[in-house]
Image: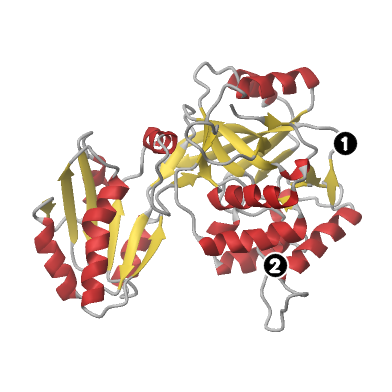
Amino acid sequence: MAEIIPFKGTLYNNRLIKDISKVVAPPYDVISPEEQDGFYSQEPHNIIRILLGRDFPDDNEKENKYTRAARFLEDWQKKGVLEKDKSGAIYIYLQEFTVDGKRMHRLGFIALLKLEDFDTHTSSVFPHENTLSAPKEDRTRLLGAIHANLGPVFAIFSDEDKSIGDILEPETKTQPLIDIEDSHGIRNKLWRISDRDTLETIVRLMKDKKLFIADGHHRYEVGLQFSKIKKDPGCGYILTYFTDLYADGVVILPVHRLISGVTDEVWSGLEKDLKKDFTIEGFLPKEHVKVFLSRATQFEKRFVVYDGHRFIGLILNSNDSLDITALHNLVIDPLRKKAKLNGGKFLIDFTKDLDYAVREVKSGKFSLSVLLNPIKITQIRDVAFSGRRMPQKSTYFYPKVLTGLVINVF
């Protein structure tokens, strides 16, 4: 089944970098342009310079953000800013965070995962979301330039008997290699396991596991294609963070939809059509939106549409599809068709922040926002293991795994 191996991680040298929190960053695909600028100004050796470089007007094939990333990586290794461990290891990673006032923690580990094609019959690794070509092209160019994995793929496995958790937990009582609070107020701790017997036990236990990708679908697919081109055994594995499906700290936030290009006439027409499938509760107060959504029963799907004036509750009595699938089939896709027939330029954006989703519509930047419940982790598992995929931006696993704590240089 899943094949993992220890590796010689490359880490920031804490003798030269006194504050590791100043050189790490979130995954590239959740960094806004404003955050990118902030990370650039934070520290000259912030991983952002390799992970998500700046474009310049005079860039060309020989001089661009990818070639600059390669030079940064090479230069920092030569200067000892980044150092590779001398022996293979697996790295324990603990994140402590707060959600809705509740203090939580998520424990996992970082190792290398053997890359393999997705196949429901023979694979041990399963995706749950579709991918887009533009991010894959970007990550392909970066990987080809730097020959390194910067941010880990995020994979989930079942540790029902806690056999792996029982190995990791005692290690967290010792002094960590890294203990920092990141820019989002999340505490991140990292330990190194290098004991041979312990490593062999973790590798052996993981052989019985099936995995599904939580975050990093683009990185995984790019790594897989790169390994086929290079045909180098060292490129046949990818940096991966693993955590337990049943852990208390596995949090999925809802990904709300922001829609532009929809006129009042188009929305009014669809609102009438929705009565065929939905029970509609209009004029919800904003403070009742979360309560309304949270009251969805096992056999219901609930959404709230905000049009700048009203919060409209939608209840669908159905248990035969995912919330996100029902939303796209019955609300998003019909809106898109009606908007295009009306000559509108339909656009969709995403956010995990409910207040932002409301504020952007109220300001007039978007026509509507559609607010929804998070998908359950078991639903994601079932979709992945059945060979199906959800639409892009269906899930937001929180917190994100930091980039730069430990990287894998081929």
Describe residue 296's horizontal placement relative to residue 93 as left or right.
left
Describe residue 36's horizontal placement relative to residue 332 as left or right.
right
Crowd tier of the residue under label 1, counting other residues whose Cα lies within 10 Å: few below 14, some 14–19, many 20 or above:
few
Q: Tell me, yes or no, whether the two marked residues, 2 and 1, touch with CB atoms within 8 Å.
A: no
At label 1, which amino acid type do we have? Lys
Q: Quadrant of the N terminus?
A: top right
Q: Nearer the viewer, mark 2 or mark 1?
A: 1
181 lies above or below 319: below
Give the percent coordinates (x, y) of residue 125. Answer: 54, 36
Q: Is residue 77 visible?
A: yes
In what element is the residue under mark 1? loop
The residue located at (27%, 60%) in the rendering is 332
Give the percent coordinates (x, y) of residue 218. Answer: 56, 53
355 lies above or below 251: below
Write down the residue under mark 1.
86
Q: Earlier in the sequence, mark 2 or mark 1?
A: 2
Find the residue positioned furthest to the bottom: 58
Give the percent coordinates (x, y) of residue 2. Answer: 60, 29
Crowd tier of the residue under label 2, counting other residues whose Cα lies within 10 Å: few below 14, some 14–19, many 20 or above:
few
Give the percent coordinates (x, y) of residue 123. Answer: 54, 34
* Residue toward you, 84 or 189: 84
Q: Quadrant of residue 75?
A: bottom right
62 lies above or below 234: below
92 lies above or below 46: above
Q: Is residue 282 visible?
A: no
Write down the residue under mark 2.
41
The residue located at (66%, 75%) in the rendering is 55
At label 2, which amino acid type do we have? Ser
In what element is the residue under mark 2? helix
Describe residue 59's horizontal placement relative to residue 86 as left or right.
left
Any mark on residue 146, and which? Answer: none
